[in-house]
């Protein structure tokens, strides 16, 4: 199956390193977001599960201001309403969230839409729905996600990407799930466009280091 990006999606730049925010509350999320932006990150996904809409919206407004200051993209996890309210760059949808097809209908072609996948079939379904990137995983166990899908491992990524790329599919695929900086090169060698990380940057004493590592590794991808 050969699926190409549409003309509007071709213009969308998908970062090689996505930061998925963590925090006990909105204030902590914002502190971590500002820290990774200062360290050179250019893509932030605000992910506030089990939080009331009002707090997510307030945090998203402030996160958008921070991302604008650093010329970074803000992606909202799950909620297209928040994307519209704060004029975020786009939305990322998990397998149990709104469908990527419905999100595209609501948000139109100008917004970035990413979707989580665990199998080749799920990847191809997202492509039909017009996603701009796919978050594929998990690489290994991660405590940040409930209802974790089957773990892929490097071997699983390699096998799946071989089939995905054989059909000349051009939508970027991002690795997710328990990723460390030591995984960057093996993941790139599988054919992945980049990685999404959370704890790696949140807990790092020197987040500049993995951000620079990813940038150098994927700059000529």
Image: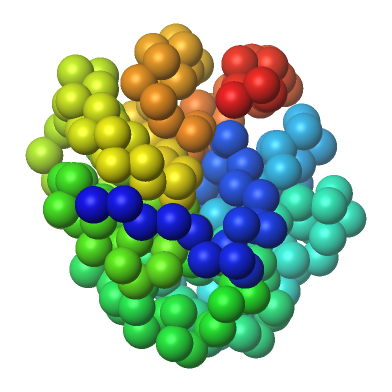
Q: Nearer the viewer, residue 63 or 188?
A: 188
Q: Quadrant of the C terminus?
A: top right
Vertical arrangement, residue 144 with respect to residue 189, above or below: below
Vertical arrangement, residue 208 with respect to residue 194, above or below: above
At 68% across and 23% down in the image, what residue appears?
A: 219
In the rendering, at what x and y percent does residue 215 appear? 68, 24
In the rendering, at what x and y percent does residue 102 appear? 36, 84
Quick check: can you spot residue 133? yes
Relative to 134, 23 lies left or right: right
Relative to 208, 151 lies left or right: left
At 11% across and 39% down in the image, what residue appears?
A: 150
Q: Nearer the viewer, residue 11 or 133?
A: 11
The residue positioned farthest toward the right in the image shown: 69
Q: Quadrant of residue 174?
A: top left
Quick check: can you spot residue 95? no
At 56% across and 42% down in the image, what residue appears?
A: 18
In the rendering, at what x and y percent does residue 162 appear? 25, 28
Number of numbered tags placed on the structure image: 0
What colouring style does the render use? Answer: rainbow
At 72% across and 43% down in the image, what residue appears?
A: 42
Q: Nearer the viewer, residue 214 or 178?
A: 214
Q: Quadrant of residue 190?
A: top left
In the rendering, at what x and y percent does residue 7 appear? 60, 66
């Amino acid at each position: 199956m050969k699926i190409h990006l549409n003309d509007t999606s071709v213009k969308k730049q998908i970062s090689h390193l996505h930061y998925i925010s963590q925090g006990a509350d909105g204030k902590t999320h914002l502190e971590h977001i500002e820290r990774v932006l200062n360290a050179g990150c250019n893509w932030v996904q605000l992910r506030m599960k089990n939080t009331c809409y009002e707090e997510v919206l307030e945090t998203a407004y402030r996160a958008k201001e921070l991302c604008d200051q650093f010329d970074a993209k803000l992606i909202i996890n799950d909620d297209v309403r928040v994307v519209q309210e704060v004029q975020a760059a786009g939305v990322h949808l998990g397998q149990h969230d709104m469908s990527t097809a419905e999100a595209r209908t609501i948000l139109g072609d100008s917004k970035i839409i990413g979707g989580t996948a665990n199998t080749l079939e799920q990847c191809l379904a997202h492509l039909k729905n017009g996603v701009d990137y796919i978050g594929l995983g998990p690489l290994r166990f991660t405590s940040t996600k409930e209802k974790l899908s089957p773990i892929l491992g490097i071997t699983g990524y390699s096998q799946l990407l071989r089939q995905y790329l054989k059909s000349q599919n051009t939508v970027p695929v991002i690795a997710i799930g328990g990723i460390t900086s030591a995984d960057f090169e093996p993941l790139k060698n599988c054919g992945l466009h980049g990685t999404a990380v959370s704890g790696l940057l949140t807990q790092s004493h020197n987040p500049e280091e993995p951000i620079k590592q990813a940038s150098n590794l994927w700059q000529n991808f």
